[in-house]
Image (cartoon, coloured by chain):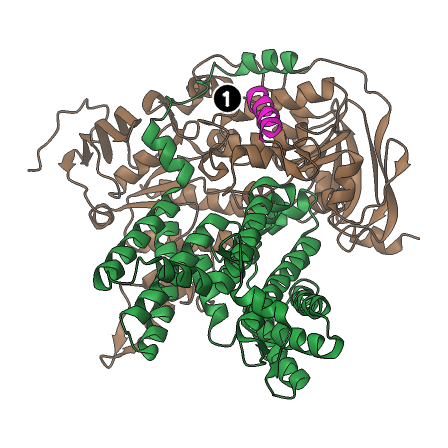
């Protein structure tokens, strides 16, 4: 059954994993079409592609969860039938998904060694042996300070859970580790630590498949880049041979000039003024935004950026200070007041905070314009349909029809639905919190274009983002926050990633104490 | 402006196929009825076949069909109101107790004032106040809806006993007999009231902004608030509606029995109302469910009750069957949710 494949021998040893002509079809969707790929021991291979390009399907095939329709998988040059997750595990293949798979009520140590727990006197769990082996594993990667062996796994943060999963893969003898968007919920520091571990694994000969939308991470880690588009492998090249624009062009299948291309224009009169705004989470925040201006907000997680948005939008009670729109002070008792004043807000967690997943695209778009789609409280189906259709067309929302449940749309299209809800209204200010998080590059480019277009038409826009290039590229000015306060403001011309980061890490707790 | 936006996006995005191929007639029909409602209709057809077959002599007689309708009237009002509560993300276990409280209120009102209208108004207002109390505890107090209405269920029952001194209070006013067993245009008035209430609820949930906002609040309360909806107001309103509906149920019961009894409505009405709503496709997590589904749930329960009586299933076994049906309904809903997710 196992036969040696004739492979082009680029190196002495055959690649750790070889895919040849792998295809998979789900119903009418051809998820993968004849994909070839080699993954070598001791390399980091970045796998990129838009959402739906086939990355996940490929990983699920390698992981043994989904059988391919055709094509072969070979490990160390030997063709293998991987029909089950246990087959993949036996071959040393592990995939770390975005939602870590751990047993919440067991300890970290138990999670690590589950399936290989030793016993004393035949029945009792050998705690001492478990602790010894756990600490040995931690020491190997210098994690003694980051994880406690007896902590309940369910109490761990996202980063720690991910570490537990990686450690578990290691102790089971991993040879190929795939990481699916591993940094999407990590802080800067946690990302650094993860990268260190990835490099260490690579040095020890583990093959790493790294799936990410974040270009700077790929640039930093990857030896080679494999680009999927519409289920086909477009190109596999050494990372040095592909610059960012080239990667993006391959992903979307057409040349991209400049993501952040923006015509110079003069801002209009001041639209938003924050004057010493204080809530229970932010302190003495002041800044302004003019009509047609895009202002960015930078800062570390917990610096008070989303909390400032919450204050402007009436979601957090303002203790002192005031918010004015077009020179008129606002009385903000709830988001309804902010919306009535002409403010729109696309929050950070699309699914949790903005969307009604079991409702249609049409309902989601027209939710905030009840007066336009009803007469005396009764819905006028035609009006709702017309407004939703207009937004869906303008924003190019990919949906079979307007009755489609929002749950079934991709992340990028879901974000467009949220934007459509606000653009259906007459806005003065639009607040966008992490507008492109988890969105593929094509949709990202569209959202950037939309932001520019809206600003050019006189809308004031506030963007909160943790992606520095996005912030610097899109905005006219950047307000930097730390510990709930504004610690600086940087114009587009003088903005650098290092400068903003230095400001964001300002320890302003002392200055806060000495303030009058 | 739209033209300009289009051209800008054209630069960054290739043309997108606007729609999928048109669906066939069968597909459109299925989508109109809804797959869930279709399976309910199939279940109903099975029940009708079973009981119709076992008691073909009486089951399909006009009289029996009217019996089923009469038996469903109170449950129908409660279950459709419960559907609205569940869609809004809540639950109201106290409805049975409110029915009992309302019958006592009506009987006392008629006794004291001699006016049927005032008595009826009194019963409905008591129901609405009970709902308001539920709504306050759930929204302002932040108490879990199950616990809140479990507590008020006991409390309302107690109030009914206190008000009536634990006695049954007879109602002698002729209007009540008229409501309970009279006919208007050849149809029983009870059934006509049921149809009217269900029609109002249907229009409310399907064709009004208020109804759509209730779905939104139940589906995602955080997003609803950030979309500018007054969640607290809507939730309290929904509990008031449920309480008032229970008050109306109390009126029908008082009219049928000719008395106000504190113990009435305690024979598992809330259980059946919730069962019907869940059978009808309500998700207990909120945001999902329809009045039509709720009505189908009620009809299934009504046919089941009637059929079990006609085929002489002992009462105690009927109780077991009703309890298991609720579990079964939730089980099926969970399986569907899993398959969907």
> Looking at the rendering, in which quadrant would you find the N terminus of chain B?
top right
**Region of the chain picked out in magenta, as a range:** A381-394
**Magenta span: chief secondary structure:** helix
Looking at the rendered structure, the secondary structure element under dot 1 is helix
Can see residue B91? yes
In this view, the residue in front, A325 or B32, is B32
Q: Is residue A378 magenta?
A: no
Q: Could you say which quadrant of the image residue B135 lies in?
A: bottom right
Residue at the right extreme of this rendering: A516
The residue sitting at 30% across, 40% down in the picture is A60
Question: Which residue does the numbered mark 1 point to in the structure image?
Answer: A244
Residue A334 place in picture, x, y as percent: 76, 48
In this view, the residue in front, A30 or A96, is A30
Residue B145 place in picture, x, y as percent: 58, 66
Residue B23 place in picture, x, y as percent: 36, 26
The picture's colour for chain B is green
The picture's colour for chain A is brown
Q: Could you say which quadrant of the image residue A297 lies in?
A: top right
């Amino acid at each position: 059954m196992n036969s040696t494949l004739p492979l082009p021998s680029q190196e002495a040893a055959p690649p750790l994993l070889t895919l040849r002509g792998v295809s998979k079809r789900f119903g009418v969707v051809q998820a993968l079409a004849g994909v070839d790929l080699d993954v070598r021991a001791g390399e980091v291979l970045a796998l990129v592609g838009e959402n739906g390009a086939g990355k996940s399907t490929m990983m699920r095939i390698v992981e043994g969860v989904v059988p391919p329709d055709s094509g072969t998988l070979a490990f160390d040059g030997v063709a293998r039938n991987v029909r089950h997750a246990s087959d993949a595990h036996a071959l040393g293949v592990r995939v770390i998904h975005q939602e870590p798979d751990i047993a919440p009520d067991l300890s970290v140590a138990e999670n690590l060694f589950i399936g290989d727990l030793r016993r004393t006197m035949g029945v009792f769990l050998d705690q001492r042996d478990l602790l010894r082996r756990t600490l040995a594993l931690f020491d190997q990667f210098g994690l003694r300070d980051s994880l406690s062996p007896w902590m309940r796994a369910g109490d761990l943060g996202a980063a720690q859970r991910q570490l537990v999963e990686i450690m578990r893969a290691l102790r089971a003898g991993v040879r190929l580790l795939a990481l699916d968007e591993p940094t999407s919920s990590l802080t800067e520091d946690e990302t650094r630590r993860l990268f260190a571990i990835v490099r260490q694994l690579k040095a020890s000969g583990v093959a790493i498949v790294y799936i990410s939308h974040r270009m700077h991470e790929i640039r930093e880690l990857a030896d080679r880049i494999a680009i999927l588009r519409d289920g086909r492998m477009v190109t596999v090249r050494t990372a040095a041979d592909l610059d960012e624009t080239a990667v993006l062009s391959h992903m979307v299948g057409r040349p991209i000039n400049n993501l952040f291309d923006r015509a110079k224009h003069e801002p209009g009169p001041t639209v938003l003024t924050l004057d010493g705004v204080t809530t229970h989470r932010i302190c003495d925040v002041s800044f302004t935004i003019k009509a047609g201006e895009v202002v960015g907000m930078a800062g570390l997680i917990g610096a008070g950026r989303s909390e400032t948005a919450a204050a402007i939008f009436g979601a957090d009670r303002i203790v002192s200070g005031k918010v004015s729109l077009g020179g008129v002070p606002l009385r903000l008792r709830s988001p309804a007041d902010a919306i009535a004043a002409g403010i729109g807000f696309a929050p950070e967690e699309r699914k949790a905070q903005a969307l009604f997943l079991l409702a249609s695209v049409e309902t989601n778009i027209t939710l905030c314009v009840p007066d336009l789609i009803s007469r005396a409280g009764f819905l006028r189906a035609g009006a709702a349909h017309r407004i939703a259709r207009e937004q869906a067309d303008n924003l190019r929302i990919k949906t079979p029809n307007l009755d489609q449940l929002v749950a079934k749309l991709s992340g990028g299209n879901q974000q467009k639905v949220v934007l459509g809800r606000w653009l259906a209204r007459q806005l003065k200010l639009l607040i966008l919190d992490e507008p492109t998080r988890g969105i593929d590059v094509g949709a990202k480019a569209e959202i950037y274009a939309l932001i520019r277009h809206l600003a050019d038409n006189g809308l004031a826009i506030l963007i909160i983002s943790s992606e520095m290039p996005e912030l610097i590229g899109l905005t006219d000015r950047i307000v930097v926050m730390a510990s709930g306060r504004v610690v600086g403001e940087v114009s587009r011309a003088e903005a650098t990633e290092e400068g903003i980061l230095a400001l964001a890490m300002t320890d302003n707790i002392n200055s806060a104490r000495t303030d009058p | 402006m739209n033209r300009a936006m289009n051209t800008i996006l054209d630069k960054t995005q290739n043309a997108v196929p606007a729609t999928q191929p048109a669906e066939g007639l069968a597909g459109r029909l299925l989508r109109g009825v809804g797959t869930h409602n279709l399976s309910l209709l199939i279940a109903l057809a099975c029940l009708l076949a079973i009981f119709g077959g076992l008691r073909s002599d009486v089951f399909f007689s006009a009289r029996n069909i009217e019996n089923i309708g009469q038996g469903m009237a109170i449950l129908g009002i409660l279950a459709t109101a419960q559907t609205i509560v569940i869609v809004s993300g809540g639950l109201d276990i106290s409805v049975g107790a409110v029915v009992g409280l309302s019958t006592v209120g009506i009987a006392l009102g008629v006794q004291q004032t001699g006016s049927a209208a005032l008595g009826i108004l009194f019963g409905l207002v008591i129901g609405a106040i009970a709902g308001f109390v539920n709504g306050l505890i759930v929204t302002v107090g932040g108490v879990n809806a199950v616990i809140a209405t479990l507590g008020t269920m006991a409390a309302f029952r107690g109030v009914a006993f206190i008000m009536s001194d634990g006695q049954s209070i007879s109602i002698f006013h002729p209007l009540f007999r008229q409501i309970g067993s009279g006919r208007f245009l050849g149809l029983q008035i009870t059934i006509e009231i049921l149809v009217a209430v269900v029609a109002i609820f249907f229009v409310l949930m399907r064709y009004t902004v208020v109804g759509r906002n209730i779905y939104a609040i139940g589906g995602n309360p955080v997003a609803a608030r950030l979309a500018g909806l007054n969640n607290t107001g809507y939730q309290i309103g929904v509990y008031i509606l449920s309480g008032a509906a229970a008050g109306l149920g109390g009126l029908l019961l008082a009219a049928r029995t000719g008395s106000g009894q504190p113990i009435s409505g305690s024979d598992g009405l809330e259980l059946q109302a919730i069962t019907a709503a869940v059978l009808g496709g309500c998700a207990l997590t909120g945001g999902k469910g329809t009045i039509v589904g709720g009505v189908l749930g009620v009809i299934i329960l009504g046919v089941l009750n009637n059929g079990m009586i006609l085929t002489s299933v002992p009462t105690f076994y009927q109780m077991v069957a009703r309890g298991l049906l609720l579990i079964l309904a939730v089980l099926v809903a969970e399986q569907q949710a899993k398959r969907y997710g």
